[in-house]
Image (cartoon, rainbow, N blue to C red):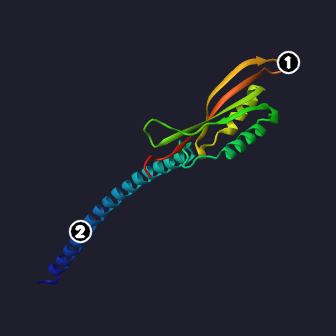
Amino acid sequence: MSGYTRQRVLIASAVLVLALYAVFAVFDAKSASARLEQAHADLAEFTEKLAEIERLKRAPRVAALQLESPAEITNRIASAREAAGLPQSSLLREQPLDPQRIQRSDFELRSTTIELAPATLPQILQFCDALRDEETGSVVRDITLTEPQNGSDGGAQEKWATELILTQMIFSPKSR
């Protein structure tokens, strides 16, 4: 083989090797692009799932795992009364009932009837808001307002007598 033919073979071999490297590089780039697109899709799904977890963490709980004692309910009512700016004499009645099983479920519902002396609507709303506690599954379920009574001043807000039902949902499996 002459020197010229040998150079041509070497150049052809080098071009062939470079072409093979180029083909592999294109395939590798396509594979990397596909992995990047998959990673981007995974990131979007992960971000969506993380947002869902955060939303669920802030969502109210439906049921408590244990029943609040009557003393805890009394303390909750006293704190709510203070938060609403209501005097101690405004609490006319507080009557916690025994928990009742909800049909054939693993949940019980305890109701506490609360009766307040006439108060303004903003005070009643603050009282109800202060009673709510998602950690223990306590919410004001029913509220009855009766007979608005106007103050002695012509510009005073109406005062409403209030009866409300504070409920607590408790998870209590029938079989332990």
- Residue at the extreme right of the image, as rendered: 153
The crowd level at tag 1 (other Cα within 10 Å; few <14, some 14-19, many 20+) is few
Q: Quadrant of residue 124?
A: top right
Above or below residue 7? Residue 130 is above
Q: Secondary structure at mark 2?
A: helix
Q: Position of residue 147 (x, y in %)?
A: 74, 17
Q: Is residue 155 left or right of residue 98?
A: right
Q: Indicate the amino acid at tag 2.
A: Leu
Q: Indicate the amino acid at tag 1.
A: Gly
What is the C-alpha distance between the residues marked 1 and 2? 92 Å
Q: Is residue 121 left or right of residue 153?
A: left
Above or below residue 38? Residue 158 is above
Residue located beneath label 1 in the image: 155
The crowd level at tag 2 (other Cα within 10 Å; few <14, some 14-19, many 20+) is few
Judging depth in this view, the residue of 135 and 71 nearest the camera is: 71
Residue shown at the point (30%, 64%) measured from the top left: 28
Residue located beneath label 2 in the image: 20
- Residue at the extreme top of the image, as rendered: 154
Q: Position of residue 129 (x, y in %)?
A: 68, 36
Residue shown at the point (14%, 79%) measured from the top left: 5
Q: Is residue 97 left or right of residue 81?
A: left
